[in-house]
Amino acid sequence: MRIMVLLFIYFSWSTCNEDIVVLILARGGSKGIPLKNLQTVGGLSLVARSILTARKAGLLNITVSTDHPLIALEALKYGASVFRRSSITAAHYAPSIWGVEEFALSMPLAKIIVLLQATSPFLRYSDLQEALKKLQHPRSYDCVFSVISRPRRQDWNGELIETGAFYVSRVEIIKQGFLQNKNCTILEVSTEESLEVDSYYDLQVANALLNSNLVSSE
Ligand SMILES: *[C@@H]1O[C@H](CO)[C@@H](O)[C@H](O)[C@H]1NC(C)=O
Ligand SMILES: *[C@@H]1O[C@H](CO)[C@@H](O)[C@H](O)[C@H]1NC(C)=O
């Protein structure tokens, strides 16, 4: 019993890290699908899936930055905070880093920002945990991001491709205007985790994969 209590305290202490905040950038306008971030995969909207993935990873400080009231409502429904994104950083030409910087300025106590891409519905919470570990061990890095490896045809070595599913970055580099620098490490994720929903076709593929149990619904 005592051990259980100690374990519980240790677990709460190690996961309720106040310095780590999760950010999901979810603007209303998108080119392929209108209100893409509210489209559903396996009965859950893309925004809801990201919030739940972060929470399963033990990350409790989760914010959805949006310019759209329906996305804000969905975020609140799943217990996330809402940050009102300015129309400038929500414009289609604005790079993500603008939105991340804008948010970072409003969170002076945050040290690490975990940027999740809502359009990657199959990201596993265990990979987020792994990424956070990699930021500190075996040595300290400024950033960690997700990649998949694709074998090259003629070459023995495959190549690594950034998936965009997440970026874990220290706030110091974000304030310099970067999500990544030379002091980054990578986390290799599975092919299904790299699936990105950009069109109705992708949405159907994602739902078909879930329905056929080809990916886990965790
Ligand atoms: C999230 O973390 C930031 C920075 O540490 C803090 O200012 C904010 O109050 C936290 N929000 C919640 C809902 O805990
Ligand atoms: C990489 O980042 C970590 C954490 O910010 C820092 O302690 C370390 O000195 C950096 N290493 C290099 C080579 O910049």
Image (cartoon, grey):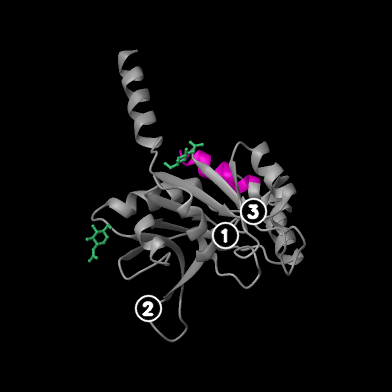
Work out whether mark 1 precedes mark 2 in sequence or the reverse, and give the earlier one: 2
Q: Secondary structure at mark 1?
A: helix
Location of residue 44 in the rendering, given as x and y in whole percent from the top left corner: 70, 45
Residue 159 vs 145, above or below: the answer is below
For label 1, the residue is: 192
Location of residue 165 in the rendering, given as x and y in whole percent from the top left corner: 53, 60
Q: How many C-alpha atoms fall within 10 Å of the one at disc 3: few (<14), some, or many (≥20)?
A: many
The residue under label 3 is which amino acid type? Thr
Question: Disc 3, ligand 1: is the CB inside 8 Å?
Answer: no
| Quarter in which the C terminus is drawn | top right
Q: Quadrant of residue 147?
A: bottom left
Q: Secondary structure at mark 3?
A: strand
Q: How many C-alpha atoms fall within 10 Å of the one at disc 1: few (<14), some, or many (≥20)?
A: some
Q: Is residue 138 left or right of residue 23?
A: left
- The answer to whether mark 3 and mark 2 are in CB contact below 8 A is no
Residue 49 is covered by the magenta coloring: yes
Viewer-closest of 177 and 112: 177
Work out whether mark 3 precedes mark 1 in sequence or the reverse, and give the earlier one: 3
For label 2, the residue is: 157
- The residue lying furthest to the bottom in this view is 154
Q: Is residue 29 left or right of residue 182?
A: right
For label 3, the residue is: 66
Work out whether mark 3 precedes mark 2 in sequence or the reverse, and give the earlier one: 3
Q: How many C-alpha atoms fall within 10 Å of the one at disc 2: few (<14), some, or many (≥20)?
A: few
- Main SS of the magenta segment? helix
| Quarter in which the N terminus is drawn | top left
The residue under label 2 is which amino acid type? Asn
x 68%, y 58%: residue: 206
x 73%, y 69%: residue: 31
